Image (cartoon, grey):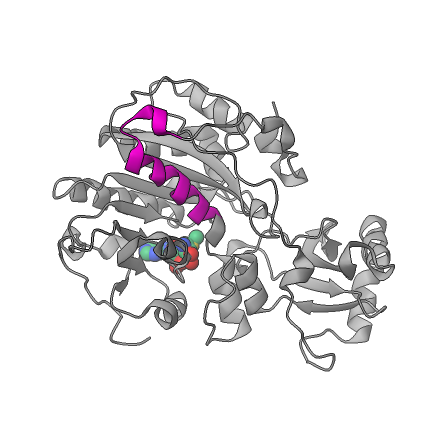
Amino acid sequence: MNGSIANRRAGPESRGDNGQPRFAEFFSGIGLVREALEPIGWRCVFANDIAPGKAEMYVERFGADDLVVDDVNALDIADLPLDLDLMTASFPCIDLSLAGKRAGLAGKHSGTIWPFLDLVEAQCRRTVPPLLLLENVTGFLTSRGGRDLAAVCERMAGLGYCIDLAVIDARWFTPQSRPRLFVTAWRGSPERPADRPPSRLRPPALRRFQIAHPNLPFVDLAVPEPPLRAETHLVDLLEEVATDDERWWLRERTAEAVGSMNPRHRQRVDQLLAGQRDGVATLFRRRRNGRTVGEVRPDRIAGCLRTPQGGSSVQFLVDCRSGEARIRPLTGREYGRLQGAGDFPIAVGDRQARMGFGDAVCVPAVRWLVEHTFLIFDEAVDDSQALPLAAAASLHEPAEHQRELFAP
Ligand SMILES: C[S@@+](CC[C@H](N)C(=O)[O-])C[C@H]1O[C@@H](n2cnc3c(N)ncnc32)[C@H](O)[C@@H]1O
């Protein structure tokens, strides 16, 4: 690890005079929250993450000046700058993810939200940050019967924040299925009427949670409906990888993988070979009945990118454009593109890049939310300025893995 950034303390600093809103990103990883916000006028003045491998990528992109590489539990409020407008936390999902053991916020990974909220509370005693933004998997909504999310919302409400909840799927912006729960909080009282018009951002499971917690200060912010789907498909984001590149699986291995697929997935490979769906798809390897089998996506987008630490493996490409099925892992650059960070510098190897991007946020999804939510705060003094919310819930078809969320 570069010694100049390890354990560096950002220290107090008050607002500069250029008028840009200032934010601190916690669990910053490789910095895709910053990647989302800075082009729309925000200025990152503090970042924190514990992982040196992520920090290496962060520093390559943004420099080391604002980054503190340390355990969030070890941070002291004196490390944070004053006058923050926004504090963000895309905290670890391992204990909330359906794929994990679901220890919830009692788990040592996802439980890092508590030291973050301790810092928010301490910051409130110095200069109150008017805005908070949390991001995590949709399992956060149902973790321990909703008690985990309720406890976080109660803590924020106790500090004087109102709260909005939204589920945003990366597939509305890039060809990747990645539904995530966003918790937006702002200091103020819930003066808006608690009307709850239908919206793709707030599926039935989210509404059930809100109804089950009538004492929490939930307010639907009047944001517009997000795009229905990305303008690009998986094929548009692929790198050219030479046919003799060693990342391609050997013919025998590919034949064995395709041969061991269940008929539905083998048929999908046949369809790719016949030129359907651009001739490409992503493949996940899963354990089914004690053996590992490949499963092919049918819909011209990638499955949710993950990291090996999250309990799942790499995502692969099945490429049939040459008339023959070939398989290789998606590259780090392709992971970056699927997260909407196609220009992000990658000076590390594929494995490290996949770790970084696989665990990151989707840039255009975060940018869309912040642009529309916090734009409202610029003008929101007057409710009539707020953007109208279209009632477009019926336009949305939940994907297979989202059924739990969308079940009425
Ligand atoms: C979901 S990822 C956030 C990714 C990030 N927003 C990005 O765009 O790259 C969660 C991050 O929390 C970090 N993390 C886990 N435990 C931590 C701790 N105790 N203190 C600080 N960071 C921690 C991980 O290294 C990981 O980068």
Q: Position of residue 17 (x, y in %)?
A: 15, 55
Is 67 drawn above or below residue 202 in the view shown?
below
Identify the magenta region.
365-386
Residue 190 placement: quadrant: top left
Depicted 255 relative to depicted 394: above or below: below
Q: What residue do we see at 16% from left, 51% from top?
A: 77
Does residue 71 appear left or right of residue 253 in this picture? left
Q: Is residue 177 above or below residue 29?
A: above
Give the overall secondary structure of the magenta segment.
Answer: helix
The N terminus appears in which quarter of the rendering? bottom left
Residue 156 belongs to the span the image colors magenta = no
Q: Is residue 172 left or right of residue 282?
A: left
Q: Is residue 164 left or right of residue 10?
A: right
Ligand 1's quadrant is bottom left
Residue positioned 43% across, 40% down in the render = 182
Q: Does the rendering let one see residue 217? A: no
Above or below, 4 against 24 in this view is below
